[in-house]
Amino acid sequence: MLKVAVLISGRGSNMKSLVNACQQEGFPAQIACVISNKPEAQGLVWAAEQGIPTAVVNHRDYGKDREAFEKALHAEITKHGVRLVCLAGFLRLLTPWFVTQWLDRLVNIHPSLLPAFPGLHVQQAAIDYGARFSGCTVHFVRSEMDHGPIIVQAAVPVLAHDTEDTLAARILEFEHKIYPQALRWIAEGRVNVHDEKCFIADVNAPPSTINPCS
Ligand code: GAR
């Protein structure tokens, strides 16, 4: 059973999707703790109600000392015997020190088809650019923001009258599918990184899609 820490900063809907997956019979991972850098993160309440250990490591307590914050975060994570860290709407950029500690054991979800549209407000950025598809990406974390070997992506169409909120909702539905999927593959030992690319054992390529249709 792979022990997992989930790091959040807010609502925590992706954390919920991981917890719900882990509660299914036979799922090969267990959420050992949910940690937030913000005491007011709504997801903490829900996680505690599920009986999951929760903690706050408030980045504000460490001022500009990012490494001190990350050392405290690392100490909190390691208390729980964790082997994998899942960022789920954790909106702090992590330093190379933390990323190296957890190399290829630190996963993030991002609401765009990386490497397109890293950063914040990415659904609006996809609309503004006129992208025909956007989507979401689960990837191993590297020091550069929203960058690293891609484990799985899902594409959704960008529709003519989309707003940031309608596109975000369409993407979020797929975030909740692909993050548990990625966690399952990792926990099953099927994800390998070579030359900064992920290879997943025993999966077939999905069909391709074209938008707009002819
Ligand atoms: C999600 O859409 C996630 O992909 C995004 O923040 C949201 C958190 O929602 N993460 C990033 O933008 C990371 N660069 P949630 O708290 O409901 O999971």
Image: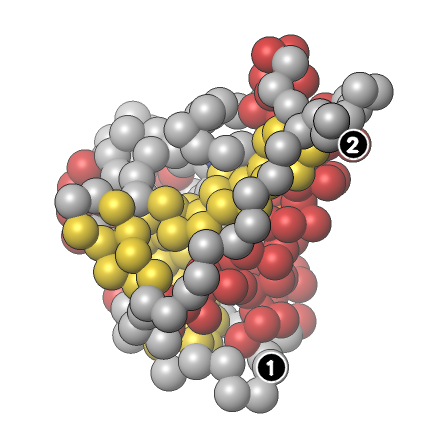
Residue pointed to by mark 2: 166
Q: What residue type is labelled 2?
A: Thr
Quadrant location of ligand 1? top right
Query: Taking 87 as reference, is 210 left or right?
Result: right
Q: How far apart are marks 2 and 1 (CA)?
A: 30 Å
Asked if ligand 1 lies within 8 A of label 2, the reply is no
Crowding at mark 2 (Cα within 10 Å: few <14, some 14-19, many 20+): some
Q: In which quarter of the image is the C terminus?
A: top right
Residue for badge 1 = 24
Side (left or right) of 200 relative to 40: left
- Tag 1: Cα neighbours inside 10 Å, few (<14), some, or many (≥20)? few
Residue 200 appears anywhere in the view: yes
Q: Where is residue 108 drawn, in percent x and y? A: 42, 47
**CB of residue at label 1: within 8 Å of ligand 1?**
no
Q: Is mark 1 on a helix, strand or loop?
A: loop
Which residue is situated farthest in the right direction here? 161
Front residue of this view, candidates 66 and 98: 98
Badge 2 vs badge 1, beta-carbon distance below 8 Å: no
Identity, as a three-letter code, of the amino acid under mark 1: Gln
Q: Which residue is drawn at 53% across and 63% down?
A: 180
Q: Is residue 11 above or below residue 111?
A: below
Above/below status of 116 relative to 40: above
- The residue sitting at 29% across, 57% down in the picture is 199
Can you tell which quarter of the image residue 20 is in? bottom right
Residue at the far bottom in the pictured view:
25
Extreme residue toward the front, this view: 214
Q: In this view, does 175 lie above or below 55?
A: above
The x and y percentages for residue 48 are 60, 68
Q: Which of 165 and 51 is in front in this view?
A: 165
Residue 139 at x, y percent in the picture:
38, 46
Mark 2 vs mark 1: which is more N-terminal? 1
